[in-house]
Amino acid sequence: METIVGSPIIRVDAVEKVRGAAVYGTDVKLPEMLHGAVLRSPHAHARIVSIDVSAAKAMPGVRAVVTGEDLAGVLTGEAIRDMPFLAERKVRFEGEPVAAVAAEDEATARKAIRLIKVDYEELTPVVDLVKARGADAPVIHDKMMDYPRIGIVNPVPNTNIVTVNEYRKGNVEEGFSESDYVFENEFRTQMVQHGAIEPHCATAQMDASGKLTVWTTNDSPHRLRKDLSDSLAMPQTRIRVISTYVGGGFGSKGGVKAEAIAIALALKARPRPVKVVYDRREVFLASLVKHATVVKIKTGVKRDGTLMARDVEIVWDTGAYAEKGPVVCMQATAAAAGPYRVPHVHLIGYCVYTNRMIAGAYRGYGTPQLTWAYESQMDMIAQKIGLDPLEFRLRNVLREGDINPVGNVVHSVGIEACLKQAAQAIGWEERKRVPRVTPEGRYRGFGLACSTKNTKTPSGSGAVIYFNQDGRITIATASVEVGQGTRTVLAQVVAEVLGVPVDTISFSEPDTDFTPFDASTTSSRTTFHMGNALKMAAENVKKQFVDLGAAVFECGPAEIEVRAGRVWPAGRPKEAMTYVEVLRHEFAAGACVIGQAFYYPPAARGKAFHGSPSLFWMYGAHAAEVEVDPETGRVEVTRLAASIDVGRAINPTNCLQQIEGGALHGIGTTLFEDMVIDERGHLLNPNLRDYKMPTAMDAPEVLPSVVEAYHNEGPYGAKGMGEVVTNSAMAAIGSAVEDAVGVRLAELPLTAEKVYTALQLKRMSHQA
Amino acid sequence: METIVGSPIIRVDAVEKVRGAAVYGTDVKLPEMLHGAVLRSPHAHARIVSIDVSAAKAMPGVRAVVTGEDLAGVLTGEAIRDMPFLAERKVRFEGEPVAAVAAEDEATARKAIRLIKVDYEELTPVVDLVKARGADAPVIHDKMMDYPRIGIVNPVPNTNIVTVNEYRKGNVEEGFSESDYVFENEFRTQMVQHGAIEPHCATAQMDASGKLTVWTTNDSPHRLRKDLSDSLAMPQTRIRVISTYVGGGFGSKGGVKAEAIAIALALKARPRPVKVVYDRREVFLASLVKHATVVKIKTGVKRDGTLMARDVEIVWDTGAYAEKGPVVCMQATAAAAGPYRVPHVHLIGYCVYTNRMIAGAYRGYGTPQLTWAYESQMDMIAQKIGLDPLEFRLRNVLREGDINPVGNVVHSVGIEACLKQAAQAIGWEERKRVPRVTPEGRYRGFGLACSTKNTKTPSGSGAVIYFNQDGRITIATASVEVGQGTRTVLAQVVAEVLGVPVDTISFSEPDTDFTPFDASTTSSRTTFHMGNALKMAAENVKKQFVDLGAAVFECGPAEIEVRAGRVWPAGRPKEAMTYVEVLRHEFAAGACVIGQAFYYPPAARGKAFHGSPSLFWMYGAHAAEVEVDPETGRVEVTRLAASIDVGRAINPTNCLQQIEGGALHGIGTTLFEDMVIDERGHLLNPNLRDYKMPTAMDAPEVLPSVVEAYHNEGPYGAKGMGEVVTNSAMAAIGSAVEDAVGVRLAELPLTAEKVYTALQLKRMSHQA
């Protein structure tokens, strides 16, 4: 029975953060450091006719000026290398970097970029997603087929479709013909911002020996190193990436963003380091957004509520460059039929370039958009066939050992319990006895929804543990603390294996020169993958103590017992020695024990990379209570219950905090957040005044809970959870609004204006 | 047959150093960094009555002022914790830190220390080593018995004797009675400076979370971390030591020196970092020196030249604080009878406090002083019994399997070959046919000598190897590159095991947060110990590739062949895959292989630490040709042959360079270097004008060669060599002077003044 795993200990990084000692990306300071600024395109689509940097170069304090020409042919992109560090000959979105300046201080750099003259020839912007996908749309990337790409990217020549992914199970036409009802709907989701407090920033230095070091608020130092190595054609060991603490990421802090500018400038300013910090407008325009989508979903169902067939088509707006778009398309499309038993399935995703902001990973990696679609439709179906929404779902949700819509046999399936817990928390059964109109005249409604998400599969994590002379432990891991609490959870795993207090464990910062390969801190994969790697590494340490104990006590390793940080020969517990005593006994002159492990899902070894089947699936459910003001259309979420299947709660408090944060995150997307882009591709609200993020004032009473459907292969049964915590909030709220005022909106967000308009239309149609 | 080991490749750090990218201690710059300066005692022995720091504190730009009171009770010392970071109540040597200031710039800090008023009450300085040892000498450390100390330190209460070490073999009195001749002589050696180009310096920061980081030019980051952890009562993982490149050490760059000042100031200036750089005078006064010694040596010999008995008493002047003195005493005393078969041996060393500069490790760790004594005496004996000095030695030197003077059975014994090679190189046989007087009227003479040195035993080294995705390798090791070429040699070992080019290998800098435990970069131990650790770690990597190969080719691991960086199933070489291909095949989504090992001499495992028997013994011989000007007494070394038993030359060029450097180092000690200290304990020549170090003008023709007496346990047969390269130079030169002009001096250095005086005395005695 575990004693440390499962315990709600305080975060191991709490003191450091509370005292202000934690170093985030913007805290990086180096001697002789220059500061960079970026000149960005005012156009969404234009040809660059000429750039004149002479005045900027001549300005006192300016040390380096770069344009795309300086890095001709250098391209980056996780799935397809389509993006220059700075625009070459053409700009493809408003805010694309065109030139950059490094100067002695930031003010000088920002002044200098205003002296750069760029002559553009405007091109027709491709802004509408549906049109962008069409055969007659202007082609944004005419060299698309020449870009280096990974195997899973399937571009369609002479179009803006950078990839198509398709999944089939059964025979969907047959499924529809066997159904009593067939529903066909279209849902849309908007581009939203991640909205991390910390802006994107990076500091780069190319030293005199030719080694490039990058200090950055990046969630995946090893992936960044590999990407830079590919882009710059440098050996990986000539590049060092140090990831600071990340001040909020939600998917936006991966890949090559501010890093590209800092590096471009550092190559010119060599050997001086250059720091680049985006302002909020730059974060809005030129970091990353969540994919806008158009989802067509067709579902066949029997009269008794049994799902028979589902056909989903998703068009993903990946913006001007693909970034992780093709991987989002591949991975999320696979989850598009939801957490249900559906015998006949066809799923197809199109990832499409537009002249809009670059879209990529955003908490949920595409599955929130899909959940909005399939769960909204689930309620429409339930209404039609006269089943309670909870009952309808319970009849169809996956259970242990089922085959999911993409043909995976699933294990660790807590969705039934999630639905029941969320429903119970919100008072699902009692809701009919609650007054539907509040004393203030607002309409009350209830809704619930559930969701599932897969994880990046396969992927590997390496870990090293140093058991020091004095019994203190250092963990060398490239997993990045982005605020999710990963260090705490990982420390608990190691402490549990070794039977030592958590406060004896420290972490070295993620640094590609020192911390072993880890695929990424994304996809809710860290607890599972790095948890496994560290569990194995800790077991490796323990095994070494068994062998040392055998030497000390002159017996076979099989006779050695190790528990609670002590080692003794079987049957002689009085002779027990601490680890430190064992070390001193065997190595009187000093020693350490080094444990190492590399975890890679065994089933995926020796196989080509294709991203499926998922190593684990996450499940969760939300139940919402809302009040809608019929005079303004304003929606208030008063209570939001969320129940998430975490496999095993290694730190229950941490899990509940994730669920609470995710609930609020979901409310933002549902009710207000929206990147408003005009027909020329200009963002109209690139700031936190005009772009509305939820604040504490918008926070409902959140009712979080966990479900523990132990995963066989997860460390102590745990699996990921950090993304699925937002997924079903949107549809739950959308259904609650429908329940309250009888209008169902197909397109997010559910702004007061939209709700009010829908109410007016409804009244008008009633009056007509 | 090895292809990379044994090859004279160019140093792997050459480009970085030539381009100025290498970071040494003085290159460390941090944002917000303060600069420290130290107020030092003008007295060698005094009580501190009062310190007034008010004026310094009030000076603009000053940010922190510390005195011993701020760190009351904090003591440091590798063997016995006797030394405060700053003097408390008493000063014990000229230059001892009394107060320190951190200010915005170094000039301000140095000005501010001049405003500090200290009232001293002078005490009788204990300067004469022989008197210091006596029972009636003033006691320098009245709390000596209370200091925490390691087991090998045996202090004598109420004296200045901090430790006594004694070794016995056979019955020395019996040995003398069986001898035909008994010789009894006294030899003395002087205090000398290491004279590294880079001064001592350190930068420390105590961050807001309570983590202490020290960037320093220190040869042993893990030992420093442990020492600081003990001194400051902080867990090891709250302390991070980063060792920069070291710009010359020779033993002086270990322990707690400038680090103490930087840390004392950083604790007060928290969280700002503080950098302290010693000027040359401070290096002279307050870093480290080589022990001055008084050696009494009594040797019994048969008429045929067979050594029968040797009794050696050494008094080691360890200065005001013990530092490594007790360990030097323990270890070097064990080597005091030389590399000879001697049946009856008694060796005793006394390590004695004086009010002089602190003595400790200096290239050779005490054995150069002893070699001066026993080899000078060997020539006196040879002369007396009428044997050629080479022949006399060859009759007595140790050979494979012999038992040495402290009872170790020795293996890998190349001393006979060293003597013969050095003698041949200098033209030992032909020397009698060479004119004894040069055309300029200078007298020519020849001398030879040999030596042996043990290594710190036992001690451990840990290593981690990261085999990266692109086939590039990162080595994580705490071994410090002090200019000895360790990175090159270690890279060759790893490249040899894995069959990959050396230029695919990079090193991460030594950093206790990331690089595993290593005892120290001292004692010529790194090639052997870290070489073994890295060889094992590389074999661990190779083993993992065997297992991966077995999975790829679906066969047993025993059927897998790995050579030249390729992996294939036995008998199917056409299917060979590179390591990278194997990795990609097994782990399509990315991976690394982590190899780790901890090397500790197997024979020492599970035993108490006692420093003996040595894991390996180094051997070497020098043969010198000198010319002595009888008008001035000036000695010029015209040729110096040196032959060193390296076990195996992993990089022959590197070995020859070490031997050349060592030869010049030896000349300095022999001819000019001397810390001139007056009867009040004041150093009269604390600068490089008055303290004479050898320059290129003093360099003889050096004739270096290696002997390879493979060591069974060494990596590819290699053992250490970096210290023994100086040892026998002194006695060889001394004997050559005697051969040239007929005077034998018992006390180093052989300055022109001393030689001239001896010649005058000799003439006078002839005339008398």
Image (spheres, coloured by chain):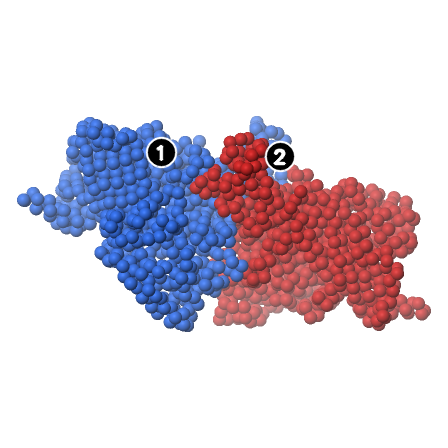
Chain colours: A red, B blue
Q: Nearer the viewer, residue A408 or A354?
A: A408
Residue for point 58% across, 58% down: A15
Please state the horizontal and vertical placement of residue B532, each as a whole percent of the image: 45, 38
Q: Are marks 1 and 2 in contact (CB under 8 Å)?
A: no
Which amino acid lies under the numbered mark 1 shown in the image of this protein?
Glu
Q: Does residue B163 sit above or below A160 in this rendering?
A: above
In the picture, the disc for residue B708 is 1
Vertical placement of residue B751 versus B179, above or below: below
Instruction: Report how many numbered discs are placed on residues in the image.
Output: 2
Give the residue at the far right of this rendering. Answer: A768
Q: Using residue B586 as the reference point, say whether residue B155 is left or right of it.
A: left
Q: Is residue B177 above or below residue B232?
A: above
Q: Nearer the viewer, residue A99 or B229?
A: B229
Query: Is the residue marked by circle 2 packed among few (<14), some (14-19), or many (20+) residues within 10 Å?
Result: many
Q: Quadrant of the C terminus of chain B?
A: top left
Confirm whether circles 1 and 2 share one chain: yes
Q: Chain of mark 2?
A: B
- Residue A626 placed where, x, y %? 81, 63
Q: Position of residue B435 (x, y in %)?
A: 14, 39
Kindly indicate the quadrant of the structure image that contains residue B716.
top left
**Residue at 61% across, 52% down:** A487
Image height check: is B237 above or below B5?
below
Question: Label 2 belongs to which residue?
Answer: B552
